[in-house]
Image (cartoon, rainbow, N blue to C red):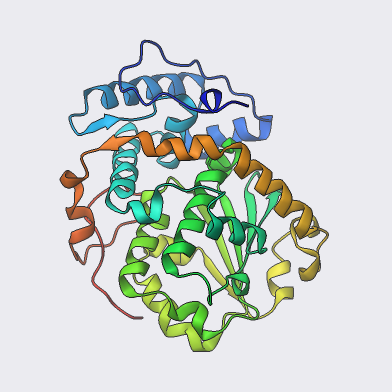
């Protein structure tokens, strides 16, 4: 596939817009209707309103307006068009404000490529309710070689790559984080400012429907650090985190087909890692072309500068910024 065929226009007012066609299995049509209020009429009306808003926005200079991109934000905000527009604003401003974290996410960059090949991440598939299941082996991060920003960039690349699947936009994602074998240095490379940027991205700036997070064998020595990290998360996200003392306890929540062999399941990590790497390579041009979008980020600096004590829910729109630093 050529570079040009992989790219999308970033013109605010293109001559015409693509016509969306729902091609997913019936499970996702039902999920979209029941959980997100999505049907053909609402989808078409909402896309039209969002495109009109982008065209008139004084600070957005360039932005994708294709259905596959805008639906991420509409589904994330359950078709509240004003909240979807705010989510898009925050996403664009985040990328402009912290380009060292969120831009030039090239799967061929040596650090990102090595992390993709080191077995840190596995996409296991979707469960019977349509939710995507992914698995992190935390100890596989090479902390002697990579720093917090590189790990954050790797996660950003994963998120952008996963959002290319409409199934995840609709069904959301269940995350397993396996801490077995991790050491203090895995946690110690993260400074407070790194934590703030990263958690804001995951919690508020990416159109990511996090349904569950399962932590396995979390080490006691790292509890203060993770409490600090979670002080930047909303209560809704914290409520979705489940900690398991054993792999067996975690495994009770998943079908064996969605568990790695090392966790008592059937999934072969090597083949799944190769599949995802192929997906990332196929979408490389699309993800790099996100950098062509532009917004006047100076207008949004208060989103990251303030230390408001107000709490912001995962499902709420853009409002204010970080809470005061507080260790539970």
Residue visible at 56% across and 70% down? 242
Residue 33: quarter of image: top right
Is residue 317 visible in the rendered image? The answer is no
Residue 222 pos. (x, y %)? 48, 84
Q: Quadrant of the N terminus?
A: top right
Residue positioned most to the top: 15
Q: Residue furthest front?
A: 110
**10 sits to left or right of 39:** left
Q: Nearer the viewer, residue 273 or 327?
A: 273
Instruction: Name the quadrant of the C terminus.
Output: bottom left
> Which residue: 21% across, 67% down?
309
Is residue 274 at least partly visible in the picture? yes
Residue 43: x, y in percent? 45, 24
Q: Is residue 266 above or below residue 165?
A: below
Q: Residue furthest right?
A: 266
- The residue that appears at 78% across and 70% down in the rendered structure is 262
Residue at 41 percent of width and 23 percent of height: 9
> Residue placed farthest to the bottom in the image?
221
Residue 214, position as x, y percentages in the image: 59, 67
Quadrant of residue 196 within the rendered picture: bottom left
């Amino acid at each position: 596939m050529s570079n040009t065929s992989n790219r999308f226009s970033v013109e605010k007012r293109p001559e015409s817009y693509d016509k969306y066609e729902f091609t997913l299995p019936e499970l996702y049509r039902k999920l979209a209707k029941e959980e997100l209020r999505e049907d053909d009429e609402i989808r078409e009306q909402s896309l039209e309103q969002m495109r009109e808003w982008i065209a008139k926005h004084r600070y957005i200079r360039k932005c994708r307006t294709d259905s596959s991109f805008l639906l991420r934000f509409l589904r994330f905000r359950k078709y509240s068009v004003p909240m979807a527009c705010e989510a898009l604003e925050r996403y664009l401003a985040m990328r402009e404000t912290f380009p060292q974290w969120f831009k030039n996410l090239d799967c061929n960059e040596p650090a990102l490529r090595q992390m993709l090949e080191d077995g840190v991440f596995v996409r296991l598939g979707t469960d019977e309710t349509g939710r995507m299941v992914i698995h992190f082996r935390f100890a596989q991060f090479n902390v002697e070689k990579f720093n917090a920003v590189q790990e954050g960039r790797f996660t950003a690349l994963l998120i952008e790559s996963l959002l290319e699947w409409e199934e995840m936009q609709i069904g959301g994602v269940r995350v397993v984080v396996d801490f077995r074998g991790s050491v203090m240095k895995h946690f110690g490379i993260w400074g407070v400012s790194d934590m703030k940027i990263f958690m804001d991205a995951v919690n508020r700036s990416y159109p990511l429907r996090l349904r569950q997070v399962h932590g396995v064998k979390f080490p006691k020595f790292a509890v203060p650090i993770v409490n600090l990290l979670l002080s930047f998360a909303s209560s809704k996200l914290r409520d979705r985190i489940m900690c398991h003392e054993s792999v067996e306890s975690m495994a009770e929540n998943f079908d064996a087909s969605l568990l790695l062999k090392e966790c008592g399941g059937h999934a072969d990590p090597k083949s799944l890692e190769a599949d995802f790497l192929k997906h990332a390579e196929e979408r490389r041009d699309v993800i790099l072309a996100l950098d062509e979008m532009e917004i006047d980020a100076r207008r949004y600096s208060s989103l990251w500068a303030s230390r408001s004590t107000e709490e912001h829910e995962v499902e709420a729109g853009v409002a204010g910024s970080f809470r005061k630093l507080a260790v539970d």
